[in-house]
Image (cartoon, rainbow, N blue to C red):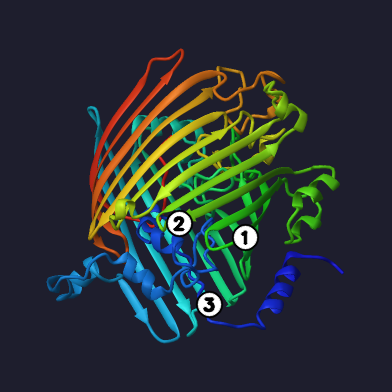
Amino acid sequence: MKYSLHHTFLFICLLFCSAFAKAQSQPIPLSNDINNRIEKSIYFSGNERSHTSMRPFIVGDLIDSAQYDSLLSPVKSKDWQTRSWLGRKIFTEHLVEVHRSDFELDADFLPTLTVGKEGSRSLYLNTRGFQVEGVVGTKKLFSFSTYLYENQAKFANYITDFVNLNQVAPGQAPLHNTTIHNTFDYAYSGGTLSFTPSKYLNIQMGYDKNFIGDGYRSLLLSDNAVSYPFIKLTATIGPLRYMAMYAQFTDDYGLINNDNTPFPKKNGIFHYLSWNINKNLNLGLFENVMWEPGQISFSYLNPIIFAHTVDTNNGSPGKSLVGFTGSYKFLNHYVLYGQLAINEFTLKEVFAGTGYWANKQGGQLGLKYLDAFNIVGLNLQTEYNAVRPYTYSADREIKNYGQFNQSLAHPYGANFREYLMIANYNVKRFSIHGQGGVSVYGLDPAGLNYGKNIYLSYKDRVADYGNYIGQGLKTHLYYFNSSVSYLLNPKNNLSIELGYTYRRENGATSTPYNASILSFGIRSSFRNLYYDF
């Protein structure tokens, strides 16, 4: 019998659809703004189905839709905000709302208009976004969402340098074949279809992002890079949740595009098993294999875990990543979490301590303090991340752990240490955010590969031994960001925001680069954009 991905999905659907139960399907946006408002309820809900390391969350899985809506709405609306149609659209409603017993549809205009200063240099971001989402059926088993963003931007200097070098607006859109620019015009879109035929199974197909982990960063799979097409199956049985995802990625590192030569593609399979051992402790096992189309067996399409073993048996044509996650909740306020990423290692070399190049691992350790000091809405977080040189890289860039010139894991790539502290306080309609970070990483001198850039082949490494974090041009990065915002409309996350960012990059052989950025404007968004690099 000819084996295909279609047959696999059909078989699993038939297997689980016989056990229908009340189960919603609408994903909660991957947004730190949203997570900060619902995080305490998610972690300490006591729900056995709460697997906090698999994101995006699904409404009705962790909390029901009514509770979710109430958490997003910090205070009741004033009478003057609801008296007129215009007032309701600005402060309390979606732009378009169609709510029936068996069908719901919401549509929003999502504007962002901010202006800023970096020294004497003027900055701006002008975004017009549109989003449509809805659910179908009385049990809300099927949901859909789609979005489009059109942007004009003049970034801070360090972001401009990044865009010109990597030909991508961070986490948003590729900018193919642009010459050196100081302003950018780009658009991107995406969407997801989600179907939950039973309480045991959710099926998603989309062009979007995913996240594995409990931290601000992820060393396994983050929402750092540009969106990608994927098909994802998630099965939940008792305290176990298992995800199998198939995705396609694009590389254009150093390539010139034309109408007759499309950018090369690579495929990825992701497996993740999450186990709630008890109400406090969760452990997870992650694996990924990246490969070039046409170079791999259909055995990779088997949704059962241990694809790394299949890759080995097939002669290792792909590039594997294995990882472990864990979290422990205690005292009704604290969450201790961590990750271990293993791209490759040789056991005897790990303990030898000689800096062997193929010992490619990363680790994360973090702590969350939710409703800190019994102050509702105050969340504190500290996190440490470290990744050895050459982690996530491959013998050829087409098999590395990247998408459109960005890492699918940490935005720094590899060869770094990072210390983070984050504070968020949400009170009524006000939100106060502060983030500070100190990082050490090794940049590459011209023509040498010290292991930070995951798009360089590890075959071009500088040495087999003596490889340590920070090698190359050792660089320190100090980053601080703060903002105060006022929420106008919880339905589309429309806020007025004042922000300040300070960044200092100090290399061993270069003049320190300082950036002091002040910004102000309105913002309406359900997405994470990372500029803290």
SS state under label 3:
loop
Q: Where on the picture, by quarter, is residue 401?
A: top right
- Does 348 sit left or right of 203 as displayed? right
Disc on the earlier residue, 3 or 2 = 3
SS state under label 2:
loop
Task: In the rendered structure, find residue 30 and report the number of the disc placed on it.
Answer: 2
Q: How many numbered discs?
A: 3
Three-letter code, disc 3: Ala
Rate crowding at label 1 as few (under 14), some (14 to 19) or many (20 or more) other CA atoms within 10 Å. Answer: many
Please identify, in this view, whether the residue under mark 3 or under mark 2 is nearer the observer: 3
Identify the residue under disc 3.
Answer: 23
**Residue 437: horizontal and vertical position, in percent?**
39, 34
Comparing 447 with 58, the one in front is 58
SS state under label 1:
strand
Disc on the earlier residue, 1 or 3 = 3
Comparing 122 with 496, the one in front is 496
| Contact between labelled residues 2 and 3, with CB atoms less than 8 Å apart | no
Judged from this view, the residue extending furthest toward the top is: 509
Residue at 68% in and 75% down: 13
Three-letter code, disc 2: Leu
**Residue 256: horizontal and vertical position, in percent?**
59, 35
**Is residue 295 at least partly visible in the picture?**
no
Please identify, in this view, whether the residue under mark 1 or under mark 3 is nearer the observer: 1
Task: In the rendered structure, find residue 345 and report the number of the disc placed on it.
Answer: none
Comparing 198 with 178, the one in front is 198
